Image (tube, helix red, strand yellow):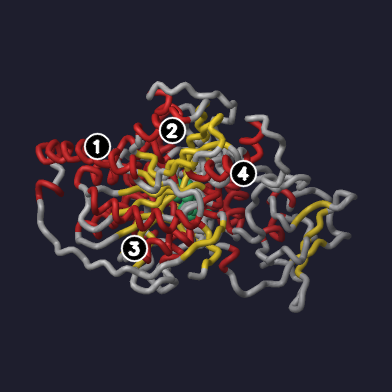
């Protein structure tokens, strides 16, 4: 059969579809996002973005209870949010197959921390399959559905950035339609009262023993003997690095990494002279191998971040590999808010009131960088609101305290924070940056913007009504491109002694289809004062003389710089140029 080049995430979607999955549900998060974005393109599957990972896991759990197959997708930190569901779903087990697709991000390419999903799997006692390439991504997802139903357990497929985003050849199969199992009420299995949970816990114990026995003979766990002077125990993408960096070494490639096949590991160790474990992120395999009494060769590979074939080769002095896993000679290019981004206007105005700003996660987190330098904290999704209240409780801050949170993040986990502020009688200020999309992860729909995962129209959440219902006394809507008006509202609301929500509403610059004429600097009027530079717009820089210059190819004509220039030096250019300034 013909083979197709696919990313790991495309292959997961294909595998889920071939496995007859009925529902895909998740919350976006790099590097997992494209799984659902690809799955939604297949016939016979319904996909939904949920407001957060816990809801997604519960929806998937309900699908499973209803007898159909479901896949739930998220990034590693999403599993923290979904963990409450997962740990008890492990006890109830499944009816239709239930697969968690969780993508870890070694090296934190786009995450606030590094986490190893295998720790949650050990804690919740659910099995983990770790693909090493796109073909395995497809076959392991299909296997995960089989194991889920056979062992009555949710199964995690753990990806990492390179497996999710790397491309390799995949042999595709046909869809295997799976009949929805008839619904059967089973209170002992599905209602986790303590008495029932204790009974189910026995099943969990028994299941683990069965899974270990399965793993000892499973084709997902593969022994490859080559030169037996060195035996490497490895999994996931690290296997590829070992094959490239140490091509002669024998390998035990573990595909089912929770639970581990102890006997297979002991047997492999007995047949090689020296044993080494090479894995990304936490020393999960190595601690377990050591606990089996197997002495390990220390290699000095980093405990965090990504490995590479070169690092692996160097650690064993096996000769330098060509440096092709790093791009050399490029200047560092930190991420920036786009030209015309509405978040820039909000943070510029916020800078004027010298507030302590508890921040959140989204494109707007980039406003923490100079020159806007507009954020004092960013921890996890939704944290901005509870933290603003907490900073206030500490009593050490005389300045205004403001929480900033994006629309998707507010729907994800901000609403309960606001509810708490109202309940606790807070008089703080929460700013919801409603740019009509989940911009950071690629413009997904969310409950606020009224766009469903397939692009169709969905009900739009009324943020104003919701904020009032939750308990905000004052709710104001501002256009963050209008700097003076925004500043006036910020001043009023942070001075007022009531709980207020300010909705900064203007679409993400990348959603605007109609181009506006760009602006340029009138050289004769520019005084080199630098006011426009302090907006941090990528379209504006200084020339050799220190004068401001606007790159008209990059400028989208948002007009924020016009408002900060006190010398009328910013003028419109382009076909409909009127040189009148203003936006
Ligand atoms: C628990 C968790 N899930 C997912 C993510 C990935 N993520 C970071 S911010 C974000 C949403 C950002 O959207 P929004 O709040 O609307 O801000 P915008 O990027 O549009 O400015 C997502 C999905 C994450 N960091 N943590």
User: At 67% from the left edge and 30% from the top edge, which residue is drawn?
Assistant: 317
Q: Quadrant of residue 509?
A: bottom right
Q: Quadrant of residue 39?
A: bottom left
- Cα distance between the residues tagged 2 and 1: 20 Å
At numbered mark 2, what does the secondary structure look like: helix, strand or loop? Answer: helix
Q: Quadrant of the C terminus?
A: bottom right
Expressed as whole percent of the image width and height from the top left, the position of residue 106 reads 53, 41
- Cα distance between the residues tagged 1 and 3: 26 Å
- Cα distance between the residues tagged 3 and 2: 33 Å
- Cα distance between the residues tagged 4 and 2: 21 Å
At numbered mark 1, what does the secondary structure look like: helix, strand or loop? Answer: helix
Q: Are marks 3 and 2 in contact (CB under 8 Å)?
A: no
Residue position for label 1: 209
At numbered mark 4, what does the secondary structure look like: helix, strand or loop? Answer: helix
Q: Please report whichever mark, 4 or 2, sits nearer to the chain's N-terminal start.
A: 4
What number is the disc on residue 244?
4
Residue closest to the eye, 96 or 114: 96
Residue position for label 3: 19
Relative horizontal placement of residue 93, taking residue 332 as reference (left or right): left
Expressed as whole percent of the image width and height from the top left, the position of residue 516 reads 67, 72
Q: Are marks 4 and 2 in contact (CB under 8 Å)?
A: no
Q: Are marks 2 and 1 in contact (CB under 8 Å)?
A: no
| Crowd band around label 1 with a 10 angstrom C-alpha radius: few (<14), some (14–19), many (20+) | few
Rendered view: 205 above or below 343: above
Q: Quadrant of residue 306?
A: top right
User: At 60% from the left edge and 47% from the top edge, which residue is drawn?
Assistant: 367
| Crowd band around label 4 with a 10 angstrom C-alpha radius: few (<14), some (14–19), many (20+) | some
Residue position for label 2: 268
- Cα distance between the residues tagged 1 and 4: 35 Å
- Cα distance between the residues tagged 3 and 4: 32 Å
């Amino acid at each position: 059969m013909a083979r197709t080049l696919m990313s790991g995430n495309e292959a997961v979607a294909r595998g889920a579809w071939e496995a007859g999955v009925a529902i895909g549900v998740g919350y976006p998060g790099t590097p997992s996002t494209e799984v659902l974005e690809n799955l939604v393109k297949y016939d016979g599957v319904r996909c939904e973005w949920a407001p957060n990972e816990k809801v997604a896991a519960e929806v998937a759990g309900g699908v499973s209870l209803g007898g159909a197959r479901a896949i739930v997708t998220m990034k590693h930190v999403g599993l923290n949010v979904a963990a409450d569901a997962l740990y008890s779903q492990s006890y109830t087990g499944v009816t239709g197959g239930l697969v968690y697709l969780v993508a870890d991000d070694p090296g934190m390419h786009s995450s606030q921390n590094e986490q190893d999903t295998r720790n949650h799997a050990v804690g919740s006692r659910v099995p983990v399959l770790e693909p090493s390439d796109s073909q395995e991504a497809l076959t392991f997802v299909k296997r995960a559905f089989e194991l889920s139903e056979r062992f009555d357990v949710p199964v995690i497929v753990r990806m990492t950035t390179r497996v999710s985003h790397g491309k390799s050849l995949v042999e595709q199969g046909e869809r295997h339609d799976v009949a929805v199992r008839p619904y059967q009420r089973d209170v002992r299995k599905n209602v986790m009262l303590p008495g029932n949970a204790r009974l189910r816990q026995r099943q969990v114990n028994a299941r683990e023993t069965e899974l270990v026995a399965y793993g000892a003979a499973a084709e997902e766990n593969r022994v490859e003997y080559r030169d037996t002077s060195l035996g490497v125990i490895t999994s996931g993408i690290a296997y590829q690095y070992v094959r490239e960096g140490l091509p002669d070494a024998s390998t035990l490639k573990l595909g089912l990494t929770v639970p581990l096949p102890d006997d297979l590991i002991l047997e492999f160790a007995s047949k090689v002279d020296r044993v080494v474990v090479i894995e990304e992120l936490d020393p999960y395999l190595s601690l377990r191998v050591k606990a089996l009494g197997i002495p390990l060769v220390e290699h000095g590979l980093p405990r965090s971040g990504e490995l590479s074939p070169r690092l692996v080769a160097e650690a064993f002095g096996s000769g330098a590999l060509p440096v092709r896993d790093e791009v050399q000679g490029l200047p560092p290019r930190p991420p920036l808010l786009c030209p015309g981004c509405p978040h820039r206007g909000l943070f510029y105005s916020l800078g004027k009131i010298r507030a302590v700003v508890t921040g959140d996660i989204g494109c707007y987190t980039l406003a923490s960088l100079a020159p806007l330098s507009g954020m004092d904290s960013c921890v996890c999704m939704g944290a901005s609101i509870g933290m603003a209240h907490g900073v206030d409780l500490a009593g050490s801050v005389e300045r205004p305290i403001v929480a900033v949170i994006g629309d998707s993040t507010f729907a994800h986990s901000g609403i309960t924070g606001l509810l708490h502020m109202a309940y606790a009688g807070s008089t703080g200020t929460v700013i919801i940056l409603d740019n009509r999309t989940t911009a950071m992860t690629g413009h997904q729909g969310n409950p606020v913007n009224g766009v469903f995962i397939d692009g169709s129209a969905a009900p739009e959440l009324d943020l104003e009504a919701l904020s009032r219902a939750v308990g905000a006394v004052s709710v104001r809507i501002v256009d963050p491109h209008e700097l003076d008006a925004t500043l006036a509202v910020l001043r009023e609301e942070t001075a007022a002694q009531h709980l207020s929500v300010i909705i900064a509403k203007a679409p993400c610059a990348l959603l605007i289809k109609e181009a506006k004429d760009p602006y340029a600097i009138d050289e004769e009027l520019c005084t080199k004062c630098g006011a426009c530079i302090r907006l941090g717009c990528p379209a504006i820089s200084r020339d050799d003389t220190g004068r401001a210059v606007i790159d008209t190819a990059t400028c989208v004509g948002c007009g924020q710089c016009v408002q900060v220039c006190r010398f009328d030096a910013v003028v419109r250019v382009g076909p409909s140029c009127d040189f009148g300034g203003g936006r």
